[in-house]
Image (cartoon, coloured by chain):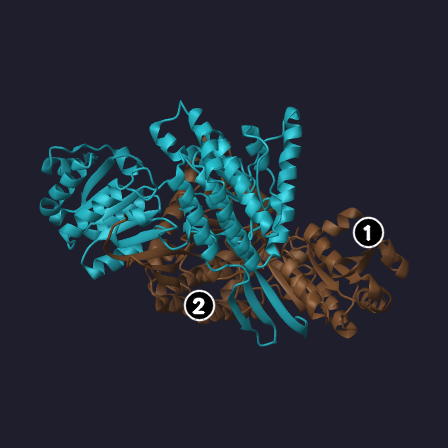
Chain colours: A brown, B cyan
Amino acid sequence: MSATAQPQTKPENAGLAAEVRAVARAAKDAALQLSLSTAEQRTAGLKAMAAAVREDASLILAANDKDMAAAGGLTPALKDRLKLDAKRVEAMAKGIDEVAALPDPLGQVMAEWDRPNGLHIARVRVPLGVIAIIYESRPNVTADAAVLCLRSGNAAILRGGSESVNSSSTILASLKRGLKSAGLPDAAITRLPTQDRAAVGELLKLDDLIDVVIPRGGKSLIERVAAESRIPVLKHLDGNCHTYVDRAADLAMARKIVLNAKMRRTGVCGATETLLVDRRVARTHLPPILDDLAKAGCELRGDAETRALDGRVTLANDSDWDTEYLDAIIAIKLVDGVDEAIAHINRHGSHHTEAIVTGDEAAAKKFMAEVDAGIVIHNSSTQFADGGEFGMGAEIGISTGKLHARGPVGAEQLTSYKYLVQGSGQVRP
Amino acid sequence: MSATAQPQTKPENAGLAAEVRAVARAAKDAALQLSLSTAEQRTAGLKAMAAAVREDASLILAANDKDMAAAGGLTPALKDRLKLDAKRVEAMAKGIDEVAALPDPLGQVMAEWDRPNGLHIARVRVPLGVIAIIYESRPNVTADAAVLCLRSGNAAILRGGSESVNSSSTILASLKRGLKSAGLPDAAITRLPTQDRAAVGELLKLDDLIDVVIPRGGKSLIERVAAESRIPVLKHLDGNCHTYVDRAADLAMARKIVLNAKMRRTGVCGATETLLVDRRVARTHLPPILDDLAKAGCELRGDAETRALDGRVTLANDSDWDTEYLDAIIAIKLVDGVDEAIAHINRHGSHHTEAIVTGDEAAAKKFMAEVDAGIVIHNSSTQFADGGEFGMGAEIGISTGKLHARGPVGAEQLTSYKYLVQGSGQVRP
């Protein structure tokens, strides 16, 4: 988790380092207070946060206007992520309401048992402590991250992108008002004192104060955080997702699912990037599926066989099988049934979300068991890979690692546990 | 998880790198087969392993004699860890029997629910994949690690200390015979081809083949692994454990517990290193507790107050509060009740195991809630910090981190999960 040669603080950054440490120290103190708060207090805080966001909607939109005015250099996709309107602010408030309505995870007895010597052992859910979340342009991540941390009793240190600094700090001020009105510590949700990149470097050194770092954004951000951090990182890497159309797939269902999985939104991590089709049904199933995709504006890149079947397909090269396009492009390959589909996915996939369309229960069972991914789906769209769609209220992201949390990360995934052992004077022989 | 500047393979190590990669590749293939094996097969494999260890007892002891003959330079404590006798080999076999009798964790549905759109979501326990375990002199770790990995469906790559190489490889051969007789893949439990330290460096680079690294041993081993590894590490760091004797402690119980917590075995990570005593009962409780410890041969190091109360106490310095002695030495400090005890522990403890002795339920409840440790114990000995004592059959160690696993790491803690989503043609709006 730590590097052999640690980056040292440069003398000119000593003041910055002290400032960042003070923020983290305050967050750690707040985390202790939060861990002792009641579920009712946390729920009241969340409800007050939703109300404050609604009350402050016009302030938030005005701050967002400032960010948008300064966003001249951004791509249209990034501008769309940055942009807030009345509907998006209301969706943010509604998301907070949903998290407020979720069962509180803390104090839950996950397991308990008695030992022959009379010791009673209970495994009880507790917060992780202090969570740092480093994200990019979407200002609503400020609310998602803060409320999931509060629901799970963690203090949050937020560091959003510079392009959303006005929106994010205005949203944060509303959230803090909600916190305060429920008697919860102000420092339970906080942000870095500056947008200076060096501040993130200082933050990533504080393994005595911060328990987990969650980077949410592009691959380069995540890799930078993973490389620099002395603190454990919950990574959300790429989603190179597949949909496999089996020989026993219902054609109408396969068409509907593939079109949605690829084209509903192409920029989300659960979008399908590669289509695998069972060679036995290529002649019947592939042309209508490709028609749908082409009509929706999707570029088709396939292996030689699919190209031979359909002239619109251009030849894919080896790197296509490993590419997360996040765009209206799909790679297409014929396979010899479920076994070859599984082998292709386990070799090229990113362990995110994988789907099979089939009416054959045995093939589905095999696919679900053998595909190595956080989410495996039978007869539905990979675009359901989302904490909200899973019923978690919101998500911080989709974890592609196997340790701690896999798949959507909601409030429950932001907890740890401790063992409480009750004795009556036992000593160990 | 990875360092900014990665260690490169030196040209002279290219052959070694290829050899290590081949071992890891075989382990990954075996892991896939294991993940598809049945609980019955894994149980049969474990039972056959226990039988093979018993059959091979004399071979194992002969190999251990060789290791002991070469162990001239080791300290008595390390020699004791290395030494096997008939009783210890039988204990090893019995430990395997216990793990064989544990419920199999794989395939367990941890949670399942239906969504309004008809999707059925299940969170199901799966293996982590390939686990590398790097340990020091105790040859029985070979069996503990291998059987816990098999129970949880993981392939294990073992790398024991050079001083136990004959014992460990003989034990491994017995375990492999057991595996094979149950039709499980030979490469499911394997070891590095050489004791060359460079081989460990090569292993720690293989984040495409290995899912987790568990270092088990001294602080320097663990820090080296954490610093070098590109693979996620489950750390088992030091156990700076405390026992707090509260004003409402029963004196007889406190004496029995403190003596056991410190002196039963001083070299285990659950041994108490600092005794905290409520100032209000220092005059009545401290002298008899210190009598017991002194009679058992324990060195006493205390703050000025405890020294004033008892002439046998030498003055502790600041570093004593942060030291894991793993020896017959105890640090002693008076505190102003449960709040100061909690503050001292949260500042100086290592989040391992902490105990309170008290008859006051409110004080106990406060201590259990506010002490930040994997295991918190009321009215019993910190030496119960052990997977076997918790009923887990065996343990790979005690995790002091908060991510993934905290406290004793048994078979269940060596698992991950995946989400299985069952649809009937749903697409996301």
B284 on left or right of A195: left
Of the pair B403 and B390, the residue shown nearer to us: B390
Tag 2 secondary structure: helix
Tag 1 secondary structure: loop
Q: Residue at x 61, y 67 (%)?
A: B421
Q: x, y percentage for residue A400?
A: 59, 54
Residue that badge 1 annotates: A316
Q: Could one spot residue B131 in this view of the protein?
A: no
Q: Measure the C-alpha gap from mark 2 to mark 1.
A: 51 Å
| Mark closest to the chain's N terminus, 2 or 1 | 2
Say which chain tag 1 marks: A
Total of numbered circles in the picture? Answer: 2
Say which chain tag 2 marks: A
Residue that badge 2 annotates: A52
Q: x, y percentage for residue B312?
A: 13, 33
Of the pair A101 and B415, the residue shown nearer to us: B415
Q: x, y percentage for residue A67?
A: 57, 56
